[in-house]
Amino acid sequence: MVIRLWILVLQLSELCLSSVVHLLYAFYIFSSAISSDLSQVFNERFKPNGGREEELKRPESLDGLPPIVLVHGIFGFGKGRLGGLSYFAGAEKKDEHVLVPDLGSLTSLYDRARELFYYLKGGKVDYGEEHSQVYGHSQFGRIYEQGNYAEWDEDHPIHFVGHSAGAQVIRLLQQMLADKAFKGYESTSENWVVSVTSLSGALNGTTRTYLDGVQPEDGTSLKPICLLQLCRIGVIIYDWLDIKWLKSYYNFGFDHFNLSWRKMGLSGLVDCLLGNSGPFASSDWILPDLSIQGSVRLNYHLHTFPNTFYFSYATKRTRKIMGVTIPSGILDIHPALFVRVLQMSQWSHPPDVPPPYKGYRDKDWQDNDGAVNTLSMTHPCIPFEHPNHFVVNESECQPLRPGIWYYKIVEGDHILFVVNRERAGVQFDLIYDSIFERCRKHVFRTSPPTLPNHIQH
């Protein structure tokens, strides 16, 4: 009895610590966005031309180049959210033709992939009739009056770069294109995607989902008391209050679930909080997709395509001392991630629970970056291995071959290359310069090399 009580006290203490750390980080992001906006307004107010600047025109030489689309991860945001704050810490300014879509920050990978398609092609987001009925939300969502790259097709393919869960969104979208899963677009194919770059991508799930509260028994349901339960309650109340200016500033992406007080009333709020309705009741949100079991289910249907180039950066903030995996320092790891780096390095799958896949071993999943296990970030490897090549020196891999996951292991935590550019220093520029240079100079679909959108004569 005393031991059980002591364990409960430790669990509650850890929950309180994690909650405070994550709330402080969220407050830091939100306040940074507001201060940036206020500073911008102040500067523009006192400019000689009244803050009006000449619109920068894209150089003519770039008109034929395929765009590079940066896809954010969990709790992320695209251009237009959180004021002038950039999820990718301004990396989008390194190239003249970069798009940064704003997708649901907590919605399922499926819903986000559908949103990404219509963001690019234009039109009303269609989540699919069958899917919408199964998970209890509206079939249609946001309307894009004009697509951000409406000419997108096999002759005008796209480079995609995804951080964290964004990498899996891209893979799922490419599979949907191959399966011709968009009504009214019967000519889609996997060749609409010329390259996929994964940056700290959760390609095979993460054990952090279990530490945050997902049940290891099924990889879907939540423990009664956990960090994700607090998150669930906060998100439901935030969406129910439906404060327009606040949601325009930051949106979790559940508008198609109609959680607003205007549509569901007080009784609907109670129903959601009790877990009887809404996205968290239906498992149509992102955390179940990021458990190892959820990734196994998803990866079973996702292919690595022979005409697409794949590259992955796997981050790591652990090291081994006498066979024991521990964090590789204190000052080098973001305060919001240090405890999770330690916990993930010591994670053991419950012995009384069936393993998430055949051949699972705890030691394979110990190295991590505080959010995703390093093994998961290298290349798709569960439930089966995809073609892959470990990269030590990128120059030795030229020319790149399509249909193979080239992966490189980089020292860094999960958020080193997003939000705060100063933390990564020169490493930030090295990573993104490498990504953009590969997209622009080394990734070609034909031989002799020609840019994907250019016709050979």
Image (tube, helix red, strand yellow):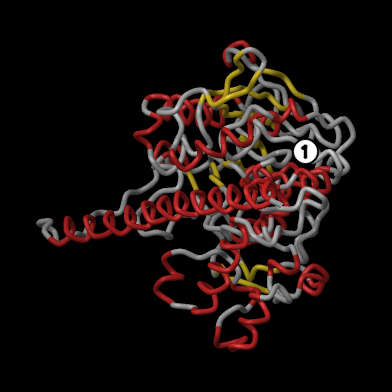
Q: Nearer the viewer, residue 57 or 229?
A: 229
Expressed as whole percent of the image width and height from the top left, the position of residue 306 reads 79, 32
Residue 275: give x, y in percent of width and height.
70, 72
Circle 1 sits on which residue?
349
Task: Give the vertical position of 177 relative to 199 (above or below).
Answer: below
448 to 7, vertically: above or below: above
Where residue 402 appears, as percent x and y from the top left, is 73, 27
Point 61% across, 10% down: residue: 396
Q: Badge 1: few (under 14), some or many (20 or more) residues near its Cα, within 10 Å?
A: some
Q: Quadrant of residue 278?
A: bottom right
Q: Nearer the viewer, residue 309 or 149?
A: 309
The answer to whether one can see residue 344 in this image is yes
Q: Is residue 256 left or right of residue 245?
A: right
Residue 457 in sight here: no
In the image, taking residue 411 as reference, residue 244 lies left or right, namely: left
In the image, residue 86 sits, relative to residue 52, either above or below, namely: above
On screen, residue 250 above or below 61: below
Could you tell me residue 330's position as x and y percent? 44, 28
Q: Residue at x 50, y 65 (%)?
A: 251
**Measuring 72% from the left and 57% from the top, which residue is drawn there?**
110
Quarter placement of the C terminus: top right
Q: Amino acid at mark 1?
A: His
At 61% from the left and 31% from the top, the residue drawn is 368
Q: Nearer the viewer, residue 330 or 394?
A: 330
Q: Quadrant of residue 444?
A: top right
SS at badge 1: loop
Query: 112 or 11: which is nearer to us?
Result: 11
Number of on-image labels: 1
